[in-house]
Amino acid sequence: MKKESMILKLVPIMLSFFVMGFVDLVGIATNYVKADFDLSETVSSLFPSMVFFWFLIFSVPTGMLMNKIGRRKTVLISLAVTFLALLCPLVDYTFTMMLISFSLLGIGNTLMQVSLNPLLSNIVTAKRLPSTLTLGQFVKAIASFAAPLIAGWAALTLGNWRYLYPIFMVFALLAVVSLWITQIKEEAPVGKSSTFAQCFALLGDNLILLSFLGIVCHVGIDVGTNVTAPKLLMERVGMTLAEAGVATSVYFLFRTVGCFSGAFLLAKVPVRTFFAVSIFCMVAAVAGLFFFRTLLPIYICIALIGLGNSNVFSMLFSHALLHLPDRKNEVSGLMIMGLFGGTIFPLLMGITSDWMKSQTGAVMILSIGVIYLLFMIPNMKKR
């Protein structure tokens, strides 16, 4: 593929990665919804859970759907569902409608995560796949970083944080149009389409299982930090929600920086070495969150988690995808099912925080995910 042609095909893919980042508005939106409807920690934790629950239900079926209609068409469906999710709060802002919105956001993101990552493998070589996936995660992180800033600006300047939704809807529409007019050649599936049993049987492969659990922990840490960071500042420093929302942006800023640098470093540095450095950043950060009670040290810890967690998904996903190159659709479905960790972790964090009456309970749950990733280091191949 000529360089110019590849770049043209990457534009709608990267726009789709930007739309993929809309799922991370769940963190700041959950905090605003909690305040607007006066919800408890446990009840408000249902919102991120409703987003990531659908990864458990739809990931493997999406992998099978791709075998029938192709990856590009599956991405287009995902973008349409995401557009509908963004429309819901503008139609009616109620507790029920927000649950529907978050559910549609999760369904759309599931379809997108499963299909967009392997679609990228039809454009770039296997050697460049980890670094290009990281570039996609960098673009995704820009949307994640922007969401709390736009919500905070809209709340303070326009009087309503929900102006975030129509702004994001414009980008979703741009992604649909650009991908619709772009043709991407996809390889035909090898053999007959896999059944559910055959897809789940891949978890019998040790590397696939370890990578799957690693993604569960990665996403749990990601969503957990996204939701908990403002609460830590409100509890320990006494900030208001509008002020504390900056903590989410700090997290995504450093995740963005990590993704951008990772896109270059992963092309040169061994994956295992890069993975180890990333995890040790998170170990130091989570340890600090147990003790720090002042603004700057907490910001530093949040930044380190963002930096350390920024490339974990790309490394684990490409690690699994390249391990079984003839089963990309099925492996992709299983790996994205691991995003169900975004349901498990916030729910456990909310319950533990209510029980302890402190966000230290949430940090305890975060540390479980970090410890697993620490023990995952020896299983990463040098590639």
Image (cartoon, helix red, strand yellow):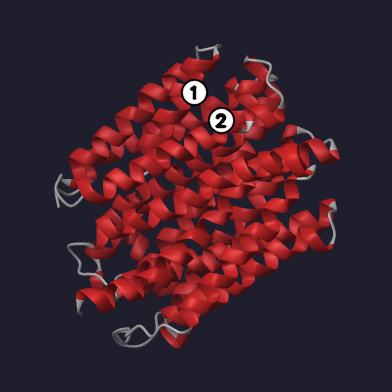
Could you tell me the amino acid type at mark 2? Answer: Ala
- The foreground one among 299 and 116 is 299
Q: Which residue is mark 1?
A: 299
Write down the quadrant of residue 90 in the picture: bottom right
Where's the N terminus, which quadrant? bottom left
Q: What crowding class fits label 1: few (fewer than 14 Cα within 10 Å), some (14-19), or many (20 or more)?
A: many
Q: Amino acid at mark 1?
A: Tyr
User: Residue 82, position in %: x, y?
Assistant: 62, 66
Seen as rendered, the residue at the extreme front is 157
For mark 1, give the secondary structure: helix
Residue drawn 55% across and 12% down? Answer: 294
Q: Residue 217: percent from the left, percent from the top?
A: 44, 42
The residue carrying mark 2 is 247
Q: Which mark is residue 166?
A: none
Disc 2 + disc 1, Cβ < 8 Å: yes
x then y, percent, for residue 327: 30, 73
Q: Secondary structure at mark 2?
A: helix
